[in-house]
Amino acid sequence: MSEKLVGYVLLGVGVAAILFSVLNVYQVFTKKVEPINLFSFESVSLDFSKFADQAPADADFKQELVSSDKLNKPLNIAAHLFFMGFVASTGFKLASLGTQLLRTIKVELKEKEVLEKVTSQKNP
């Protein structure tokens, strides 16, 4: 009986992990929840004053090429999606293990037919 209980627990935890990851990814894409803040790169900029020989010393010729928001947000969403994929695959493994514990294994042997075939082959 304890196998069945463990099987139901594993199945429940696995399905809950899958549902959590699906709902969390949905909430991230609908912008109800922020993704994991894993990356925080600075913006990519280019300083043109280094290219000009006769530029005044106090002139600021910096040009921002890619803002930090446009750089970090897609990377954070991709990292969040990757992590939730890991959570979902772990949930699948747990649910699969739970269903294997819940299944009853039925083995039927056909000894009589096998013995008759073996004995008929030995005695021509």
Image: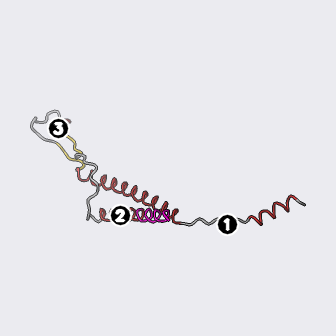
Coordinates of residue 103 in the picture (x, y in percent): 54, 66
Which residue in the rendered view is the most extreme toward the top? 53
Q: Please, is residue 73 above or below residue 117 in the view?
A: above
Q: Is residue 78 or residue 65 the one in the foreground?
A: 78
Residue interval drawn in magenta: 1-13
The Cα–Cα distance between marks 3 and 2, rounded to whole angstroms, is 51 Å
Identify residue for label 3.
Answer: 49
- SS of the residue under disc 2: helix
Kind of residue sitting beneath label 2: Phe
**N-terminal of the two: label 1 or label 2?**
2
Which picture quadrant has residue 118? bottom right
Identify the residue at image location x=46%, y=58%: 93
Coordinates of residue 99 in the picture (x, y in percent): 50, 64
Kind of residue sitting beneath label 3: Ser
**N-terminal of the two: label 3 or label 2?**
2
Sort mark 3 into few (<14), some (14-19) or many (20+) by Cα contacts within 10 Å: some
Coordinates of residue 98 in the picture (x, y in percent): 48, 62
Sort mark 1 into few (<14), some (14-19) or many (20+) by Cα contacts within 10 Å: few
Identify residue for label 1.
Answer: 108
- SS of the residue under disc 3: helix
Query: Residue 66: which disc?
Result: none
Identify residue for label 2.
Answer: 20
* Residue 8 sits inside the magenta stretch: yes
Q: Nearer the viewer, mark 3 or mark 1?
A: 1
